[in-house]
Amino acid sequence: MAGWYETVGMIEIDWAGEAGRLRSSAEGEAGWNAAVAATLVRDTDRVVVDVGCGGGGMAKALAEALPSATVVAIDADPDVLEQAREHTGGLVRCELASMDDGAEPLRQAIDAPADLIWASASVHHAADQQAAVDALASLLAPGGRLALAEGGLPARYLPWDLGIGEPGLELRLDLAQDRWFKVMRDSLPGSVPMPYGWTDALTRAGLVEVTTRSVLSETPPPLSPERREEVIEGLRKRLGWLTGEGHGHGHGHAMADEEWLDPADLEVWQQLLDPEGPYFLGHRTDLAVLAVRSVHIGHAPR
């Protein structure tokens, strides 16, 4: 997490308002977190850190994979951190600190060189992403690893032709969100471009043996009612980012001066997400989940 309440031009990200959703995500992704944690840990790891821990899902998975290690979960928002503390149930140590403040507060929170640092979808909220990667790399013990979960491929949930509106609706939502993300990045105070990939960022931070692992997640149709509702809520949230109607206090005012979606597409989405309407996605049996998430890993020299 980049900060307690981040105002980004037209876009507001209220992390406290996101705390409950992040906790739900941590619970829902327990299987993915456990599978990825198993590929990252070593029996010799003694200090493991989750920076920008959100709901604490990966921190808990790392602690369960390494019961003899010290696992530290770090986030910049106290409400988010409290959700992580509850979710991890005493398995990890939770510390309040921000990447925006450089390496030293993180170093004090960890209190020892780290054998493994995990940061998922958090570095891209730093104004200077390379500086954030540099800071994280500086916290590693010799031979330690920094794993950044950033990017991958856009998730797919819907058929191409939904029988309403123009086909390819989900593709156009991805493009709109990509434009939204660019405005978010450009509007961060002190924003610094990073016109290269995450593996280059890790290499520039002085790490070696840099590589990427991408993890496929797939749930074929028909989805369970719970999974279908999770997908629908995720789509509803994405629309909230783009229309300024995000849940709680988050992601407001995004449409103040710009329309991210074509009005015709927006009208279709509103029908698809209306539980009382004939086109509600909750009535469909052909929703699926297909996602690819990438983890970029670098090693500190020995």
Image (cartoon, rainbow, N blue to C red):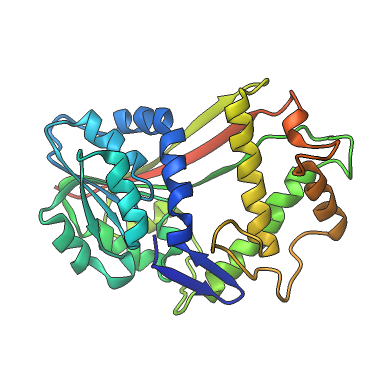
Picture mark count: 0
Q: Is residue 45 left or right of residue 187?
A: left
Foreground pick, 83 / 124: 83
Residue drawn 42% across and 35% down? 27
Q: In this rendering, does residue 150 appear at all?
A: no
Q: Is residue 282 above or below residue 113?
A: above
Q: Point out the image quarter for the N terminus.
A: bottom left
Q: Residue 117, how many percent across, how many down?
A: 26, 48
Residue at far bottom of view: 190
For the point 32% across and 61% down, the residue is: 78
Q: Position of residue 134 (x, y in %)?
A: 29, 63
Q: Is residue 65 visible?
A: yes
Where is residue 59 drawn, in percent x and y? Answer: 29, 41
Residue at the extreme front: 276
Give whichever of 265, 21 is nearer the camera: 21
Tell me if 123 is positioned left or right of 108 in this view: right
In the image, residue 38 lies at what x, y percent? 30, 28
Q: Is residue 26 above or below residue 31?
A: below
Residue under the point 46% across and 41% down: 25
Q: Quadrant of residue 87?
A: top left
- Lateral position of residue 291 relative to residue 117, left or right: right
Say which of 287 and 299 sits in front. Answer: 287
Which residue is drawn at the image coordinates 21% and 60% (left, top)? Answer: 138
